[in-house]
């Protein structure tokens, strides 16, 4: 009997085979595109079937496989346990949906030979990271995933922005991998125990654990988009073709979350309580800053990328809570917080993929990503706008959709925390709860803007007037995701119960069995008296809305007349006079932006008699980029400039340098205690 | 039999909020008018307005989309469900566990989300100005509200509103500073959420100062009736919420006799009237503030709520 891990490795191998095949067929655009996306769709679906069988039968017993590749005498270890099963579901479902979408969307790609080979390779890389069971395989797959996604980011490399995005992504990805390399180096110790099993058994010292946590926050955090390591994400994610953007935002960030959970919750053993403070701090910061950046954005895909940063912040807040509870031996609360984090990861992969697909459909239809040039698309693309609206409602965590459920679980986890003994956490947790609530409210504002400016109102440019509905493959992918957003929102108990093996294996506890609750309600912990029932809320809204419609149509007037918009009697015929995204964000910019972005608004009035128009100047600073990255860049420039002349020395001087260095090394050795 | 009784009480509650909501608004208008030494419209004027609006034809802007026509019903349904989940005269209703206080706040958030979208649908500047200001207010009011929910939940041990109300009515709850802070913050949030003076003026006729009214400017006829009804319901919801948490006396628990139900309803109407008079007094005594003073007002509510929660977290170990 071949193990599940081996079956999935065959899946990875066939994805790699597809990548090779894609090099051959990508010269014949139409059929080649369909063949490649058809194959990736089939492979991802098959992997999902294997995983589904595993979840239904026995998700706990790990399934392993060893391949005689990699480092000599060590080989490559692979393992499939509850945690990796969950993340593989996220990856392969995201992969399947992106492939389905790609079947239609891919035909609009001007340079398919730059996309097709890397798309299956990217999927294979992500699968491998989650399957890996030793440090070498993990890092190799991680780097493979980074590089294949980098190739997809610079598909349209002739555009200036994309080249810059690719460069910054490459630098940040290398930096992240370096941090991971050091983290695993510390974990494996001087003996070089590269397998995760040995690391788990070794039990690191507190000092090592501290360094590993810091390095994981740098390594996995930079891939996930934790502030202040997020700078590459809003550049790189939108630069790729939209289905790849969906994969990068919806799925690859989850792989980073997986890496973090694997090391911190699994390999490091018992956490210390203050490590949770660091995670909570960066999580809260990321959530609020991410969504504020998104609110200031006018490029639709970049807005979505910034909102990914916010959601990563929410996930890390829940992870921080889980760490705090785990360190204080409160297993049921820790299981609640971890479930909230994983549930949100799943939800985010649903609605963020959906929204990026929608943005891709808008991009294909109009050729525009700039929201200020769109508007009124609801008339031209009714189906796309409907599913995009579902995504917007879900991501704004509004009931009865799925985003609300994970937000609700996170809030319930916050409410478990007054029993934490440490004062630091007592002060930190309510503040972070407030930040979580703030980011949820700002997310709603952000997606009112995203939907309202793009799809509602009057068309702002002629690009919109020739827009057409998306093709049927794209629509199918989006409708499936929208349906799942609703289903996971009204039947959250299934998902929570499905996550219980993960929390059992990492924390040793689980949330109460939700299926045992009456009427499919969900409850956070056994002794709690709080509950939420998405299904009944949905049914009640449906019933009362239909009752209202019935009463109105039975007793009220049916008369309806179309006329020009009222607008208080001001007949404005210029679509340019509508509210734009920038003006929509103005009140929030005045409240938060003056502090966070040092935003300034100035109106330049012409002197009396002058004929030039008045101008409105808005200045926004990306404070993190300006205070953190620009100085580093400048220091690097300075250092390289001044070290440059080292390349033009005479042989005598080189020999002197070598000699001096040797003496310094010997001195160090002699003086080392 | 018990099930039928439960369902009857639940249904009675849903109908009661529907019936009383316009009356509360009419009552507040009447009291405000009397305070200004005017005669004021009759108490039942809001009902008449609703009926009149329903009988009128709808004038729809040329480019209004399907969303614009669906949204009034969605807003009404979400607000009605939320209002029906707040204990008015009885706790422990059949379906009170369906959604807790967090979900009620989020349901109102859904209603607001859709209202802001409706405002942007036609593409007039007034809609945009209303929507952008509304989300600015919400971005501060919603976190404040959630922090208030945290405080209440920490005191009562659950986010279930029925449980909170029952706990607040029991002798276990003492005088707490954090509850006082929550009450003040909740009143401030309620004023902002219901577009009352000093945040917004429900009776304004000056377009540039409008927030809520600017968003519904393009609505007419039965659609406007639905939206107006929803805002009446929302006001009633907040008044019931404040009174069931901070004035929890006179609530009946499930399984009481029929007379106690009648008594509880009378109590409830009394509470509504008292809050109506207080709100009218407050609105008459204060002037509307500039839009960009509102963040300070709501920021104060947010800080109060946060302080209240912090105090609870910290005092847990003392």
Image (cartoon, coloured by chain):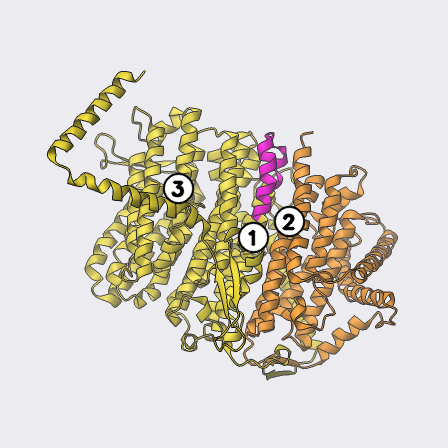
Left or right of residue B179: residue A57: left
Q: Quadrant of the C terminus of chain A?
A: top left
Report in which chain the residue with disc 2 lies: B
Asked whether the viewer can see residue A156, the reply is: yes
Number of labels in the image equals 3
Taking depth in this image into account, of A475 and A224 the one nearest to the observer is A224
Left or right of residue A227: residue A142: left
Mark 2 lies on residue = B146
Question: What is the CA distance from the residue labelled 2 to the residue labelled 3?
Answer: 31 Å
Residue span colored magenta: A415-436
- Could you say where residue B68 lies in the image, as x and y percent from the top left? 58, 72
Q: Residues within 10 Å of mark 2 (few under 14, many from 20)?
A: many
Please name the residue shown 58% across and 38% down the image.
Answer: A428
Q: Secondary structure at mark 3?
A: helix
Report in which chain the residue with disc 3 lies: A
- Could you say where residue A640 lies in the image, as x and y percent from the top left? 26, 43
Mark 1 lies on residue = A440
Q: Colour of chain B?
A: orange
Asked whether the viewer can see residue A397, the reply is: no
Report in which chain the residue with disc 1 lies: A
Taking depth in this image into account, of A313 and A257 the one nearest to the observer is A313
Left or right of residue B153: residue A308: left
Chain drawn in yellow: A
- Could you say where residue B87 lies in the image, as x and y percent from the top left? 75, 52
Instruction: Please report contact status of discs 3 and 1: CB closer than 8 Å, yes or no.
Output: no
Mark 3 lies on residue = A220
Q: Quadrant of the N terminus of chain A?
A: top left
Question: What is the CA distance from the residue labelled 2 to the residue labelled 1?
Answer: 10 Å
The answer to which image quadrant residue B224 occupies is bottom right
């Amino acid at each position: 009997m071949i193990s599940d891990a081996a079956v999935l490795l065959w899946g990875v191998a066939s994805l790699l085979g597809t990548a090779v095949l894609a090099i051959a067929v990508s010269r014949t655009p139409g059929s080649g595109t369909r063949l490649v996306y058809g194959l990736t769709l089939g492979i991802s679906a098959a992997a999902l079937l294997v995983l589904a069988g595993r979840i239904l039968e026995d998700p706990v017993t790990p399934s392993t496989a060893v391949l005689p590749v990699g480092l000599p005498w060590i080989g490559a270890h692979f393992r499939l346990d509850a945690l990796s099963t969950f993340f593989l579901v996220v990856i392969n479902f995201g992969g399947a949906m992106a492939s389905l979408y790609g079947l239609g969307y891919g035909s609009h790609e001007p340079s398919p030979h730059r996309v097709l080979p890397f798309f299956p390779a990217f999927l294979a890389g992500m699968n491998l990271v989650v399957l890996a069971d030793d440090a070498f395989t993990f890092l190799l797959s991680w780097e493979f995933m980074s590089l294949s996604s980098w190739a997809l980011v610079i598909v349209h490399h002739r555009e200036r922005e994309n080249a810059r995005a690719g460069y910054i992504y490459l630098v940040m990805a290398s930096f992240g991998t370096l941090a991971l390399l050091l983290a695993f180096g510390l974990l494996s110790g001087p003996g070089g125990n590269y397998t995760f099993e040995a690391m788990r058994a070794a039990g690191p010292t507190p000092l090592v654990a501290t360094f590993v946590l810091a390095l994981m926050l740098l390594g996995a955090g930079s891939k996930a988009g934790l502030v202040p390591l997020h700078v590459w994400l809003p550049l790189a994610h939108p630069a790729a073709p939209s289905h790849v953007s969906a994969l990068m935002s919806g799925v690859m960030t989850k792989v980073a979350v997986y890496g973090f959970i694997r090391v911190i919750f699994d390999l490091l053993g018992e956490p210390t309580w203050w490590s949770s403070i660091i995670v909570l701090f960066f999580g809260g910061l990321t959530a609020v800053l991410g969504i504020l950046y998104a609110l200031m954005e006018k490029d639709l895909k970049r807005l979505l990328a910034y909102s990914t940063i916010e959601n990563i912040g929410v996930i890390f807040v829940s992870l921080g809570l889980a760490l705090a509870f785990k360190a204080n031996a409160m297993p049921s609360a820790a299981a609640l917080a971890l479930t909230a984090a994983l549930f949100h990861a799943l939800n985010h992969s649903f609605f963020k993929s959906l929204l990026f697909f929608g943005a891709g459909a808008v991009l294909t239809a109009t050729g525009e990503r700039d929201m200020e040039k769109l508007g009124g698309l609801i008339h031209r693309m009714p189906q796309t706008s409907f599913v995009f609206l579902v995504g917007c409602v879900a991501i704004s965590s509004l009931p009865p959709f799925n985003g609300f459920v994970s937000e609700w679980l996170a809030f319930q986890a916050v409410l478990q925390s007054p029993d934490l003994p440490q004062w630091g956490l007592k002060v930190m947790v309510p503040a972070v709860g407030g930040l979580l609530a703030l980011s949820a409210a700002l997310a709603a504002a952000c997606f009112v803007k995203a939907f309202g400016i793009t799809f509602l109102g009057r068309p702002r440019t002629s690009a919109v007037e020739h827009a057409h509905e998306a093709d049927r493959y794209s629509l199918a992918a989006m409708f499936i995701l929208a349906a799942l957003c609703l289903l996971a929102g009204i039947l959250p108990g299934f998902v929570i119960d499905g996550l219980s093996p993960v929390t059992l294996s990492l924390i040793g506890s689980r949330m109460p069995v939700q299926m045992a609750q009456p009427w499919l309600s969900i409850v956070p912990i056994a002794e709690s008296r709080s509950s939420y029932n998405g299904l009944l809320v949905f049914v009640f809204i449906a019933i009362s809305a239909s009752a209202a419609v019935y009463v109105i149509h039975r007793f009220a007037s049916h008369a309806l007349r179309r006329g020009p918009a009222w607008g208080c009697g001001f007949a404005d015929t210029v679509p340019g006079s509508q509210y734009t995204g920038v003006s929509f964000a103005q009140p929030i910019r005045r409240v938060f932006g003056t502090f966070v972005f040092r935003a300034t608004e100035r109106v330049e009035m012409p002197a009396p008699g002058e004929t030039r128009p008045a101008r409105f100047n808005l200045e926004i600073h990306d404070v993190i980029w300006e205070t953190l990255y620009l100085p580093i860049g400048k220091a690097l420039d300075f250092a390289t400039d001044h070290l440059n002349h080292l390349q033009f020395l005479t042989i005598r001087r080189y020999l002197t340098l070598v000699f001096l260095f040797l003496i310094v090394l010997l001195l160090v050795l002699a003086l080392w205690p | 039999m018990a099930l039928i009784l439960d369902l009857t009480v639940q249904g009675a509650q849903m109908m009661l909020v529907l019936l009383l909501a316009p009356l509360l608004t009419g009552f507040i208008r009447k009291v405000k008018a009397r305070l200004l030494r005017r005669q004021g419209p009759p108490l039942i004027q809001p009902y008449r307005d609703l009926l009149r609006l329903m009988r009128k034809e709808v004038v729809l802007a040329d480019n209004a989309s399907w969303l614009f026509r669906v949204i009034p019903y969605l807003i009404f349904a979400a607000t009605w469900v939320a209002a029906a989940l707040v204990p008015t005269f009885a706790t422990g209703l059949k379906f009170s566990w369906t959604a807790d206080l967090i979900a009620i706040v989020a349901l109102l958030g859904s209603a607001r989300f859709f209202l802001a979208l409706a405002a942007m649908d036609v593409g007039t500047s007034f809609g945009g100005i209303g929507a952008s200001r509304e989300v600015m207010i919400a971005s501060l009011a919603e976190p404040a509200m959630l922090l208030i929910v945290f405080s209440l939940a920490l005191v009562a041990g659950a986010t279930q509103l029925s449980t909170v109300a029952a706990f607040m009515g029991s002798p276990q709850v003492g005088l707490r500073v954090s509850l006082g802070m929550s009450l003040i913050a909740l009143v401030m949030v309620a004023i902002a959420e219901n577009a009352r003076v000093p945040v917004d003026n429900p009776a304004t006729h000056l377009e540039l100062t409008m927030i809520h009214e600017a968003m519904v400017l393009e609505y007419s006829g039965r659609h406007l009736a639905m939206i107006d009804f929803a805002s009446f319901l929302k006001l009633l919801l907040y008044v019931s919420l404040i009174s069931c948490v901070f004035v929890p006396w006179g609530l009946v628990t499930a399984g009481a006799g029929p007379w106690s139900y009648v008594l509880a309803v009378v109590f409830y109407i009394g509470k509504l009237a008292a809050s109506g008079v207080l709100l009218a007094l407050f609105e008459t005594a204060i002037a509307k503030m500039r839009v960009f003073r509102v963040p300070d007002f709501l920021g104060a509510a947010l800080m109060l709520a946060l302080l209240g929660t912090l105090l609870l977290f910290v005092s847990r170990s003392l």
